[in-house]
Image: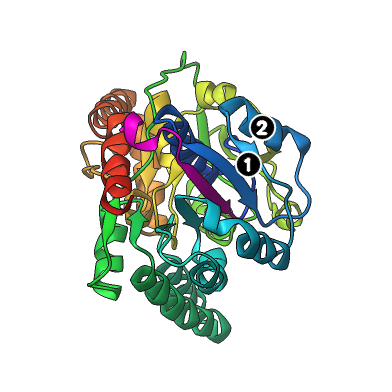
């Protein structure tokens, strides 16, 4: 593959400059950028956020990626019109960016192959949110997103799904699309466990609707069931919290840490990982982290969706507040079961989420269009 990339140029278009310690999607971008550079591609990175911390561009430079000045969508369109014809491949992330840019690319650089990375099934995530909340505007947005995703899938030379579950949904949406399943890799990183008596950990960007909803759901529906029955109970919510969630904390046993550069101390002290997500799609980086660090997991089917995890073998299922509370109580009462679940989940991580699991299908996707 390195010979195929040697000397070729790719324009990598994303919504944000990668910040892997804040977003799972950023980690995914860094991994793909790393592979492209390892295979000899010359990579220019352009993103649509006007203000970014300087460290983001520095991290790209350390990867050997040239970070172009950020700008508005209009500025990106202008760059594409001027420069797209000079690239051998154009990578597009997220439907929100890809839908308006694809016509510009086709006009400016006819014949240049486009690789579209869905990152998750955006319309499915929005539809699930609408079904849960009953919000008609969210449903209307989901229907618009669905049509945008279909159009991009059919226009791009090849597309990436991040899990087999997402791939099935995208294939049903656009049966003629050329689709490859490319996930993320995560190495096992067991921590020295010093768990506190009943510390439940959740990690995620609390500004994202699905994580925000999950945090409120745990505070308002799961914790009230556990408090009368579990002593020294604590729910730790870790991640960026740039919204009003702090005003909604309703008990001294809820700890909101904000963004943490190093999450290992939280994983060391946590008794278990709790992720009863009620909507979402794609591969959940939080689940990979919990598996890598050796925590027993209580999670919803949506949190585990698209992963080769078996309920009762790798994790305990929690698709309702009573089920979540019962699973937490079960693990608190039986630490041996928690150790068994964590060990099997880590083995699943070793088997299915090594670097080769990303490298091989990504190489196939590139070879199919370049």
Q: Residue at x 46, y 17 (%)?
A: 191
Can you give x and y, in whole percent of width and height, for residue 27 in the image? 51, 38
Q: Is residue 93 left or right of residue 3?
A: right
Can you give x and y, in whole percent of width and height, for residue 259 in the image? 68, 38
Q: Is residue 178 above or below residue 39?
A: below
Q: Is residue 89 above or below residue 44?
A: below
Which is more N-terminal, label 1 or label 2?
Answer: 1
- Tell me the quadrant of the picture where the N terminus can be found: top left
Q: Residue at x 43, y 30 (%)?
A: 40
Residue 98 falls within the magenta-colored stretch: no
Q: Is residue 228 visible?
A: no
Q: Nearer the viewer, residue 351 or 95?
A: 95
Q: Is residue 200 left or right of residue 328?
A: right
Can you give x and y, in whole percent of width and height, for residue 346 in the image? 30, 27
Count of marks, rendered view? 2
For the residues labelled 2 and 1, say whether their Cβ atoms are less than 8 Å apart.
yes
Q: Is residue 295 left or right of residue 48?
A: left
Q: Nearer the viewer, residue 234 or 96?
A: 96
Q: Residues within 10 Å of mark 1 (few under 14, many from 20)?
A: many
Q: Secondary structure at mark 1?
A: loop
Q: Nearer the viewer, residue 229 or 263?
A: 263
Q: Residue at x 57, y 32 (%)?
A: 232
Can you give x and y, in whole percent of width and height, for residue 175 in the image? 23, 72
Please identify the residue farthest to the top as the structure is shown. Answer: 192
Name the residue carrying label 2: 260
Name the residue carrying label 1: 239
Q: Secondary structure at mark 2?
A: loop
Q: Residue at x 57, y 36 (%)?
A: 20
Q: Residues within 10 Å of mark 2 (few under 14, many from 20)?
A: some
- Magenta span of residues: 1-14
Q: Is residue 101 above or below residue 238?
A: below
Residue 3 falls within the magenta-colored stretch: yes
């Amino acid at each position: 593959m390195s010979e195929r990339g040697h000397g070729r140029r790719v324009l990598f278009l994303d919504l944000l400059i990668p910040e892997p310690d804040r977003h799972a999607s950023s980690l995914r971008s860094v991994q793909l950028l790393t592979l492209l550079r390892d295979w000899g591609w010359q990579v220019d990175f352009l993103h649509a956020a006007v203000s970014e911390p300087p460290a983001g561009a520095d991290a790209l430079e350390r990867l050997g990626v040239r970070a172009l000045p950020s700008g508005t969508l209009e500025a990106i369109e202008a760059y594409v019109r001027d420069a797209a014809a000079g690239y051998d491949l154009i990578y597009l992330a997220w439907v929100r960016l890809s839908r308006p840019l694809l016509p510009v690319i086709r006009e400016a650089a006819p014949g240049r192959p486009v690789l579209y990375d869905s990152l998750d099934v955006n319309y499915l995530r929005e539809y699930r949110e609408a079904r849960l909340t009953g919000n008609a505007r969210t449903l209307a947005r989901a229907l618009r997103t669905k049509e945008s995703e279909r159009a991009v899938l059919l226009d791009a030379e090849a597309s990436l799904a991040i899990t087999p579950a997402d791939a099935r949904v995208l294939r049903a949406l656009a049966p003629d699309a050329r689709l490859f399943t490319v996930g993320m890799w995560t190495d096992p990183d067991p921590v020295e466990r010093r768990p506190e008596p009943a510390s439940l950990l959740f990690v995620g960007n609390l500004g994202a609707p699905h994580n925000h909803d999950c945090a409120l759901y745990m505070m308002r529906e799961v914790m009230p069931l556990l408090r009368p029955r579990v002593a020294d109970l604590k729910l730790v919510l870790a991640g960026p919290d740039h919204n009003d969630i702090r005003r909604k904390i309703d008990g001294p046993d809820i700890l909101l840490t904000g963004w943490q550069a190093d999450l290992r101390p939280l994983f060391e002290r946590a008794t278990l990982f709790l992720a009863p997500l009620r909507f979402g799609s794609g591969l959940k980086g939080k689940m990979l982290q919990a598996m890598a660090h050796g925590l027993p997991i209580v999670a919803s089917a949506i949190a585990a969706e698209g992963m080769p995890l078996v309920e009762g073998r790798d994790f305990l299922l929690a698709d309702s507040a009573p089920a979540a509370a019962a699973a937490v109580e079960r693990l608190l009462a039986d630490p041996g079961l928690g150790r068994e679940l964590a060990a099997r989940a880590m083995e699943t991580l070793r088997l299915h989420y090594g670097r080769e699991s990303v490298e091989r299908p990504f190489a196939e996707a590139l070879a199919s269009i370049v």
